[in-house]
Image (cartoon, grey):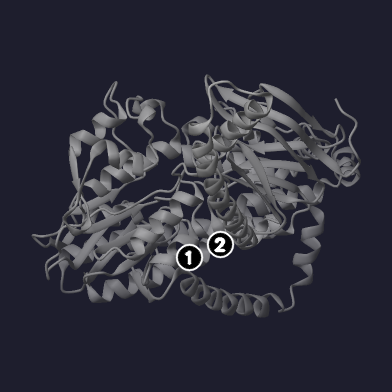
Amino acid sequence: MLSLQPMNYLSVENVSKSFGEQLLFQDLNFGIEKGQKIALVARNGAGKSTLFKILVGQDTPDGGIIAFNREVRIGFLAQEHGLDDELTILENVFNAKNPMTKAIAAYEKALLNEGDLQQAHDLMDQTGAWDYEAKARQVLGGLEIHDLERVVKNLSGGQKRRIALAKVLIEEPDLVFLDEPTNHLDLDMIEWLEEFLNRSNMTIFMITHDRYFLENITDEILELENKSIYRYKGNFSYYLEKKAEREALEESSREKAMNLFKRELEWARKMPKARTTKSKSRMDSFEELKERVRKNTDPDSLELEINISRLGSKIVELHKVKKAFGETQVLNGFDYVFKTGEKVGLVGRNGTGKSTFLNLLTQQLEPDGGKVVIGETVVYGYYSQTGIKLKDGQRVIEAVREVADFIPLKKGKTITAAQMLERFLFPKHMHFNYIEKLSGGEKKRLQLLLLLMKNPNFMILDEPTNDLDVFTLSALEEYLQHFPGCLVIVSHDRYFLDKLVDHVFVLDGHGNVKDIIGSYSKFRQTMDEMEKADKQIKQEQQALPQPVAESAAKTKVKLTFKEKFEFDQLEKEIPLLEEKKKLLEAKLEQSLADHTQLLKVTEELGKVVEELDTKSLRWLELSEFA
């Protein structure tokens, strides 16, 4: 282990890595110092995930040195969650080997009469675990992790990913490595995480495709390109500016090199066979120049020129559409008529029915009431989260040829399947690769190609930005901005939404859809103003004097961690249930003439009232000791 300066957390010296004959990167040199918030960006396939794995010890370099400061506590969030499937959420979150976690565990046992309460209380004081416990509740609440006694093996992949993120945030290491931390988070959670990391003292090294996240958190960008590292001391907008300047200089240098190459080529062709030492030296320089010119002229940008099918006057119409799953009302009599060229963002918390809305739109689901009418000229292109449906042993070129051997472009031109693959950054040597061997980003890029080859005029994109690098995203955005058909987007990428959508559908989970004109940021501004108003009302209510007896009771007994967490959740859930009760009571009055609807609403109202009574009673019990 190298001896590092006290403020230097990590030193990377001359690190190289290859896979077979493919060189990913060579002689990388950089360091991470205390307090920095660094992001690594690169095109898919350039090796950023491999470099990340090397830094966190999941892979080894072919050569070079990686040295950590011995005194630094390190944590990381990788693509694999790393949780114990047999333990509960709570056990996984507090499974860290640090003094505060041990103190909380001892305190929880003492509250259950399984230890010395005074000794456990003192240990909490000594380790500062009270603040740690409060932060744990804040993190779990921010990431909407509830039911802490659930066993991890019964959870979805997205839930496990959120728990893994919560675990590393609660542990708050000195240096944390985050691989796509915004994946599986909804927009509210991403904004919460952004605020949390900005307030945190943690030093951060991360990979993310979320450009607002890059803009608002990072103070340095590392770009892995041409097998080397380029450093930019600033956030994402600074990086874009300086990268453009660098590429302009390289373009000027390339033109000079090309002119010199032409002169040297002419000399090489005229050179006599008998070589002097001087001519041999010049030939060596010529070969180096040729390699430099060749490398700089390699195509590395995604080109999208697909034609689209003609779209008629009648597109997609929703007439009084109703749909519910269990207690979740997705749509309750929704009416809308799509117009040519409109671009809609679909937002809402996890579980409000965004995917259901898309499946109704494409008639993959039948509505409970109302109807969805699709025009005869509509050709859907549905980019789903499930990705490519693989056939055993299918190769990349075979998947493309299944759609078409020739693809129509604009202005009556055509292109072969192989040429189309090359435009989507699949060089010839990859055409016969098995699809299951592709990286996540390469599979997504292939999925996008297969979608566009069908010439859709109504595109539905469900989380299209996952696993795509920022460069591919920029090319996709450029294409979609000029896409003349209709576009519906579900995405947690705020930058992507802001750049593309004209208005936003907001699902509230109670069957209502708000149509907010403008970008996602406009929607957030509207929501923030409403939240500020609600917060002010709550503050005024909390300012009212509390009974003395209640204050005295609070000092006698403390809640366990789980009880505190339950109390916090009840304070959020009860107002929502009260609002739902009001809506159902109003709906009950409207349903008097419809016997079937009346029975349905009455039954639902009864369940809500029962749940509200149970939770209100539990809140009263806990509030005596909160």
Residue 591: x and y, percent? 22, 72
The kind of residue on which mark 1 rests is Leu
Nearest to the observer: residue 587 or residue 482: 482
Residue at which label 1 appears? 576
The residue under the point 58% across, 34% down is: 286
Q: Is residue 249 visible?
A: yes
Tag 2–tag 1 contact (CB < 8 Å): yes
Is residue 372 shown left or right of residue 221?
Answer: left
- Residue type, label 2: Lys
Closest to the observer, 432 or 2: 432
At 26% across and 46% down in the image, what residue appears? 451
Let me know if residue 386 appears in the view: no
The residue at which mark 2 appears reads as 572
What residue lies at 27% left-to-right and 31% top-to-bottom?
Answer: 397
Look at the picture and state if 507 lies above or below 299.
below
In the image, 138 versus 425, the foreground residue is 425
- The x and y percentages for residue 564 are 67, 52
Secondary structure of the residue carrying numbered label 1:
helix
Q: Quadrant of the N terminus?
A: top right
| Circle 2 SS class | helix
Whether residue 227 is situated above or below residue 482 in the rendered picture? above
Badge count:
2
Query: What percent of the width, then of the height, locates residue 126?
Result: 91, 44
Binning the other alpha carbons within 10 Å of mark 2 as few (below 14), some (14 to 19) or many (20 upward) gives few
Query: Foreground: 570 or 443?
Result: 443
Vertical side of 199 occupied by 45: above or below: above
